[in-house]
Image: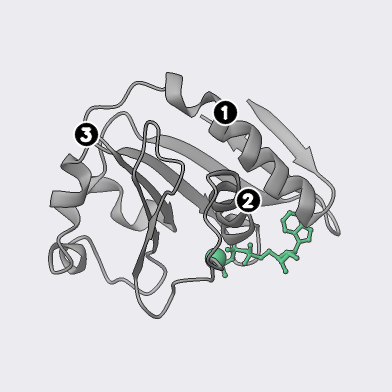
Amino acid sequence: MEIITKKVEETKRAAAELIKKIDQMAHQGALVLALEGELGAGKTAFTQGLAKALGIEEKVLSPTFVIMKHFNIPSAKTFNNLYHLDCYRLSGETDLGEIGFKEILKGQANLVVIEWAERVKKILPKDAVWIKFEHAGEDNRRITII
Ligand SMILES: Nc1ncnc2c1ncn2[C@@H]1O[C@H](COP(=O)(O)OP(=O)(O)OP(=O)(O)O)[C@@H](O)[C@H]1O
Ligand SMILES: [Mg+2]
């Protein structure tokens, strides 16, 4: 599925639309949304839209300097926890071992959103949903959900 958004609000709305369908997505353990795409392509904006749609009121920032941030999902139905990761500064998969990432992947009630997911592809579950972000001229972004 491919969509073009023309401003940041549209990217956030696209995330809110996706979350409505997320209950139907099969997942063994955590559901992983693997976001890929260059700097400023809209990965964090998408995550902000997702978090808001889940009822999370805390501000979602780029977690670049903390690697991972956890949020409780207040209106928990399928998922109780949102984990937001940014792997831009990671040198490889091994770094994630130190923050208990493998345990997080086992939890069926965990929704895991990973920016720069291609850097840790090897340790992600096979049923991860890959979402590609591309610049498509000025404020346009192409979002492709695989
Ligand atoms: N259609 C659009 N969708 C998303 N963001 C847009 C759009 N048009 C303009 N923008 C702007 O582009 C920027 C996207 O930044 P964002 O932090 O979401 O990117 P990112 O992919 O997370 O980058 P990084 O790799 O640095 O983490 C924001 O400043 C946002 O306002
Ligand atoms: Mg970002």
Q: Name the residue under label 1.
A: 20
Q: Which residue is drawn at 40% across and 80% down?
A: 65
Disc 3 target residue? 29
The residue shown at (36%, 38%) is: 79
State the separation of the CA atoms marked 3 and 1. 19 Å
Rendering coords of residue 93 (x, y %): 21, 60
Query: Left or right of 59: which side holds 109?
Result: left
Name the residue located 78 percent from the left edge and 46 percent from the top edge. 10
Side (left or right) of 36 relative to 86 = right
Quarter assignment of residue 84: bottom left
- Residue 33 screen position, x and y as percent: 43, 42
Sooner in the amino-acid sequence: mark 3 or mark 2: 3
Tag 1 and tag 2, C-beta contact below 8 Å? no
Residue furthest bottom in the image? 65
Horizontal arrangement in the rendering, residue 26 relative to residue 1 (left or right): left
Residues packed near mark 2 inside 10 Å, few (<14), some (14 to 19) or many (20 plus): many
